[in-house]
Image (cartoon, grey):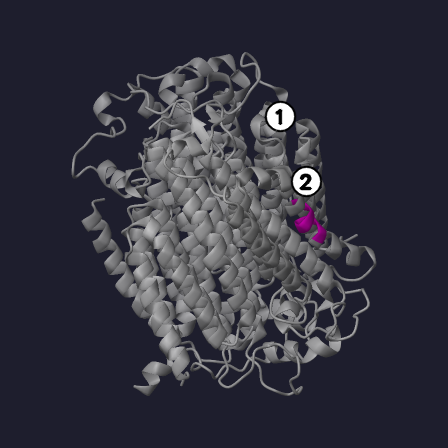
Amino acid sequence: MVPPPPLPVAIPLLVAAALVAGNVRPHRRLADGTAIACALVVTALCGLLLVGSLRGPIVYWFGGWSPRQGIALGVDFAVDPLGAGLATLTSLLVSSAMVFSWRYFEEIGQLYAALMMAFLAAMVAFCLTGDLFDLFVFFELMGVAGFALAGYEVEEPGPLQGAINFAVTSTVAGFMVLTGIGLLYGRTGALNLAQIGRSLSLHPVDGLVVVALLLVTCGFLVKAAAVPFHLWLADAHAVAPTPVCILFSGVMVELGLYAVWRVYWTVFAPSLGQARAVTGLLVGVGCLTALLGAVECFRQQHLKRLLAFSTVSHAGMFLVGTALLTSSGLAGAAVYVAGHGGVKASLFLCVGILMHRFRTVDAARLKGRGAAIPVVGGIFALGGLALGGLPPFGTSLGKELIEDAASRSHLSWVAVVLTAASVLTGGAVLREAGHVFLGLGRLERRPLHEIQEPETAGPRWRTPLVMVVPAVVLLAAGLVVGVLPGFPAGVEAAARRFVDSGAYAAAVLQGRSPPRVVPAVAAVPEAGTVVLSGASAAGALLLALLSLYAPPRLRRPGPGRGRLRPAAWFGWAQSGDVTDYVAWLVLGTAVYGLVLALGLR
Amino acid sequence: MSPLVAWLPFGVAVWLFVVGLYGIVTSRHLVHLIVCLSVVQSSTYVLLLAVGYRSGALPPILIDVPARTPTVDPIVQALCLTDVVVEVTVMAVLLALAVQAHKRFGTADPTRLRPQRG
Amino acid sequence: MTPRQRLLVFLAGAAGLAALLAWGVAGLPGFGDHRSAYGQLVTRSSVPLRNATDVVTVVNLDVRGLDTIGEEFILFCSVTAAAVLLRRQARERVGAARDEFPGRRAPGRDDAVLVLGTAMGALVVCFGLYVVGHGQLTPGGGFQGGGILAAGVALLYLASGVRTLERMAPEWLLEVGEAVGAGAFVLIGLASLAAGAAFLQDLLPLGSSGTITAGGTLGLINAAIGLEVAAGISLVVSLFLVQLARIEEADRP
Amino acid sequence: MPPAIQVAELLVVALAGLAVVLTRDPVRQTLVVGFFGLQLAVLFLTFQAPDVALSALAVGSVALPLMLLLALARMRRQGR
């Protein structure tokens, strides 16, 4: 049975309104229970939509305004397997976050749950919509809920600064998207993705198309943290409450990428095809992002900040996979996203547990103290190995698929970059696992200045089950993604559907279901890349041990001064000053635009 | 001269976009920065409405007009309405953050909010 | 970065961005030459299909109603966000704001101000209700009317002082009003779904064109939005007002 | 060719936008932005968009300046 597509959006919105209205007499447990139930229902609905869309896209016109005379009048949800899959992942993570936050946020009654429900509805609608303007609307809704959740700890300077940086950059990005929408509407008189794509392909490619592509892509890439738009991310992710972090890192970044490619394949692909300029630019940017994020990640000792930078690095890897503009690259990235969502969320939850027990996320203050919670240590270490690329985790399968796809596009060197980034991020997590949970190593670290106030109430001598269970479940989900037979083949089929602009437009505008796509055969990674994955996990472990035990001069560069040290350069850009970030945003957009203008003309 | 004037509305949109960004980048006060953000946003109103304009057409209000009278595009106006709401809401959240930041940092200068280090 | 470096980075980028934007808008049809089949089709069908004469309202609430649900929830979220961010903190207490400005008189003490302000506020509130009610016929609607209503409430506050306002429209009431307005919009959509039609499909009688009942559900939706916007904006304003009256016991610089 | 009134209003809006950005004192800027909002509303009227003009008026010259002034008042009280 396929449920009506508006339900997974309407239900959480209604619950959000009810929670605020009921805040007159707040009842925390009832509110949390309702929110968890709602998130689970949405997960089930999205799962059903996913299954239903395997047979062909589900197109739903709001208000019954189906296309007349071949012109789309209303707003549609066009559900395809990748979009529905991302929506399912999102609602799953929201469910886990709500379970984990059973002990959080005592002081604002039901408002936290209400914000989370609105956030959930926005993300699901973002995945399902087939309308360009609605992508913008739900981008903003996601943003507004996100700013509040990021800045929740208003007593602290860090979260306020993080939320302001997030809000300002994200809002500027939103206006860039909207300007792009204005240009496209002026040319085509349409807002439906399929309709714009069809009408745009009637004209030759000119400045308007290039600039619209630039504005929409850069706007969404701000969410997806591509260099140099990534600066806000660490500030916001490192300070948000833990349950919110898993949503920011696990899906919000990925949603930005999803939007870039949804728009590219429906709107621009009919006129541009598999443009080499786009591949060249975004593969390059992706590699740069992956490496820069990984290096920054390796330098951190603030555990949340470390994980935030590893998200930047992974966002770069996803960008590489998707920018190949082939279905296999996209499929690899999708598998990677699914695996990463589980693993990264689990890692954040482990940090949340450390915070609950020891009131700090500064590794220097935590040395050896984690030994009291060996289970959490085990999860954390496994998560580190998974990030490093240990088969058969979903993360390693995704990485292998991207590498195979890249070598088929004659970009074999991409494997080197991806492996280096995996070794660094995995190594950083494993290093902290050894340092915090086993007390290993001879690292001399100065404690950080800032002490975060505890996020949770309740006794600190034990770890509540509602915190451990989600961490285990999410890590297991990251593993299941990698071993589930038929999963990569199914994703490959979904990816082929995603990149088939003609079939999408026919389904949306004429209501014609495309011919059934035969599941892809070659969805098994090649032996060589599997070995490489294992090697990269081993490399991560080795790097972790090296950084724990190597003589001081070989260890990580300190945050000290020095003009020629890369550390100083990173610190210079990562200033925490939002006016800097906007300046970089403008420069980055101009540079991207220059490359696209030269390449697409 | 004439083609320049014909593109004036779009030029004004581009101008407001860039000028607003200049204000953000050089801002020394969070409230000033937020207001500059609203200038960037007003660029999108001007662009959208200019894109949907039709010379000599009536507003899309169909009281006492013959059925075939040309009107300006109602779609962009609906988009603009949404855009206006987005403006006021984002301003409200940012101002709330700015008020709290001023309490914590003792300053509203965005360049002097203490950078965090990891 | 030093301000100089930042400015250089920005100017380099802005020169490029401005050139690119100019290149982009050069591809638009000239100003005034817009001919969109989409807009024309909606305009032609709005009176025959909905009996509503303000096409923008038809687009906003019906043809592209999902946009507006999203938009209303952006407003809803931001008001909730403001309530979360401006919540009372442990070390704050409510103090008397007027002690802070010894030389000044608090507003609303003067009888003339009270009478005139209340009269004008009442007038503005009436106008707001009118704009909400006639959204489907003439320019205006839930959002515009709600904004005007909130302005009327602000005027009443200026005339009669914050205490009276708190008694008339306390925070919890505004919160409930805002949530009910936003929720009602979704409920109207779900009701159509439950009746077997598409989400937000109009099932009510369309009334006759030019009267206040024209447009079926459009009137109901406008009322819901009007409630939400008026309550939401008033709540944000009152949250900022309460901030003024809050004193931190230990101000941390 | 836009009619003269639109050209004039566009130029006013462009200059007012610049003035908003260049007014560095936030309290004074609130007044300037109120004027800017008013001019935008007039521009939208000349663009035959009464719905947008009305909401720009409600937001740009009432809600926004009010919120700005209240936020600034809170900050100023802090400074004392």
Disc 1 vs disc 2: which is toward the camera?
2
Q: Name the residue under label 1.
A: A469
The front one of A202 and C108 is: C108
- Magenta segment main secondary structure: helix
Disc 1 residue type (three-letter): Val
Residue A466 vs D9, above or below: the answer is above
Residue A416 vs A202, above or below: the answer is above
Is A6 displayed left or right of A444 in the figure? right
Q: Residue furthest front?
A: C111
Question: Which part of the image, by quadrant, shows the C terminus of chain A?
Answer: bottom left
The answer to whether mark 1 and mark 2 are in CB contact below 8 A is no
Question: x, y (%) of residue C22?
Answer: 34, 72
> Residue drawn 60% across and 19% down?
A464
Residue A600 vs C79, above or below: the answer is below
| Disc 2, SS | helix
Residue C57 vs A321, above or below: the answer is below
The front one of C62 and D38 is: D38
Q: Residues within 10 Å of mark 1 (few under 14, many from 20)?
A: some
Q: Mark 2 points at which residue?
A: A21
Residue D77, quarter of picture: top left
Chain containing the residue with disc 2: A
The front one of A116 and C211 is: C211
Q: In the image, which residues are magenta?
A: C179-184
